[in-house]
Image: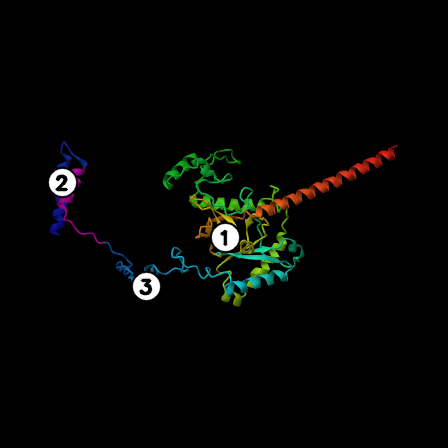
Amino acid sequence: MASSSTVVAAALLLSTSTAFSPHHHPHSALRSLSAALPATRSVVVDPDGPTPIIEPDPFPTVEVDELPEAQYDPDNHPIPHQPWRRGDTDGCHDPLTASWRLEAESIISDAVTVVGAKVEDVTWYMAKCVISINEQSLSDVVSYTEGPEVRVVYPETEDIAGHMFDDPDEGTDNELFTEEDEILDFEQYDEETEYEILKANMPEEIDEATGEPLPPREPRSREERVIEMEEEWTNRWLDEPREEKPADGMFSHPVDTKALSVVSQAIITALEDEQVEEKLQILSRHDVILTSPLDNPCILDSQKEFDAARDLDVYVETRDPWGSNRVLGGKLVDRNAMDVIINQDNSGRMVTIPNSMIHQVLLPSGLAKGNARMKADLDAEDNEDEEDGWDVEESDVEEEDYVE
C-alpha cells in the first residue's frame, strides 16, 4: 500500500507542477511518469501451448559410387567401332537383319495385308519405323473400323525430302500474339515491369447497360497467355479446310485418310499385343510413320532403294541446326538404322554420316531414268493432244456438211 500511495502522490505532484509550467510539453509528463514507474516484463501466453521445436531434416547423403553419372567408362560405347558415339541406344543400333526387326516387319506386313493394303518397304531409323504403303492398294481397304486420326503432311515445295530445321529465334510469318503482347510491342521485360506496362495501358471498356467506363481489367500472366495461344493454334488447325491434294501441283495424288486410319489401326493393334511388345518392343522404342514411296529415281528414300544403290556414286547432303551444311560425294557402302556410310571420292576413306544429320541422298545415275520417264510423259501428253485435235476437226467437218 505504501508503494501505491507513493506512485499516486508522485503522479499528482507531477500533474500539478506541469500545470503551472510556462513551457509545458505534452510528452514530458509521459516521459517523467514512465521513468517513475518500475519496468515490468510483458508476458504473452499462447493458449495452444509453446511452439514445438522443429528439427531440420537431415542432409541426405549420397554414395558417389551409386550414381549412374559416376560410372563413366571411356571404353563403354554401344557400337565397338564407333568410339565417338555415346549414350544408350536401347538396342536400336542392331543391324537391319536383326531377328526382332525381321519379325516386326513380318507382323506389320501381315497386319496391312489383312485390311487390304500392301507394304512396299519398311525403313528403320534410330527411333522411327517408316512404313511405305502402296497407294493403289488403299482403294481395296474396307473402312469397317474406326482408327486413329490421320494428319497428312506433304513435303515442302522447295524441300522435297523434308527434314527441315526451324530456327525458333526467327519466328514464322503466321505468329500469334495476345492482346497483352501487342501492348508490349513484342519486347521482353521482367515480370514486374511487364505488369506495370500492361496495367497502365489496358484498353478502356464501356458498360453497355450504363454507358459508363468500367475499371481496367487485370492483365493476364504469361502462363495464361501461353495457354490461350496454344488453344488458338489448336482451334485454327481444326477450323482449317483440309486439302488432301496439295495446291502446288507437284503431287497430284489424293490421299484417302479413312483408309490410312484403318491401316494404321491394324498396325498398332498388331504391335500392341502384350506378347509382341514384350518380345520386340517396337512401339516403346519407335515412332511408327506411314508414308508413300517417293518414286523419284534421283533421291534414295527407302531401304530397298539404298540396298539397290550400293557401290553406286551418291551425293549426301547434310543439314543441321548449326549451319554447317555440306555435300559429300562417294560410293555408297552401307545404310543402316543409324548411319549412311560412303567411300568418299572413291579414295578408300570411309565416312560415316548419322541419319539424323542427313537431308537427302542423291543418286546421279537416276537422272537418265528420270529424264526417260519425263520424256515418256511428255510424249503421252502430246499424243493425247493430237488425238483430241483430230476429233475436233472431224466434228467440225461433219457440222459444216450438215449445215450445207
Residue 41 is inside the magenta segment? yes
Q: Which residue is mark 2?
A: 14
Q: Which residues are magenta?
A: 27-43
Sooner in the amino-acid sequence: mark 3 or mark 2: 2
Disc 3 on helix, strand or loop?
helix
Q: Quadrant of the C terminus?
A: top right
Residue at 76%, 38% in the rendered image? 389
Amino acid type of the residue that numbered disc 1 sits on in the rendered structure = Leu
**CB-based contact (under 8 Å), mark 2 and mark 1:** no
- x and y, in percent, of residue 54 in the image: 27, 59
**What color scheme is it?**
rainbow
Residue 264 is inside the magenta segment? no
Residue 157 located left or right of residue 59: right
- x and y, in percent, of residue 142 in the image: 66, 58
Q: Nearer the viewer, residue 100 or 352?
A: 352
Q: Is residue 242 among the parts visible in the rendering?
A: no
Q: Which residue is mark 1?
A: 332
Disc 2 on helix, strand or loop?
helix
Amino acid type of the residue that numbered disc 2 sits on in the rendered structure = Leu
Q: Nearer the viewer, residue 348 or 318?
A: 348
Q: Which residue is mark 3?
A: 66
- x and y, in percent, of residue 394 in the image: 81, 38
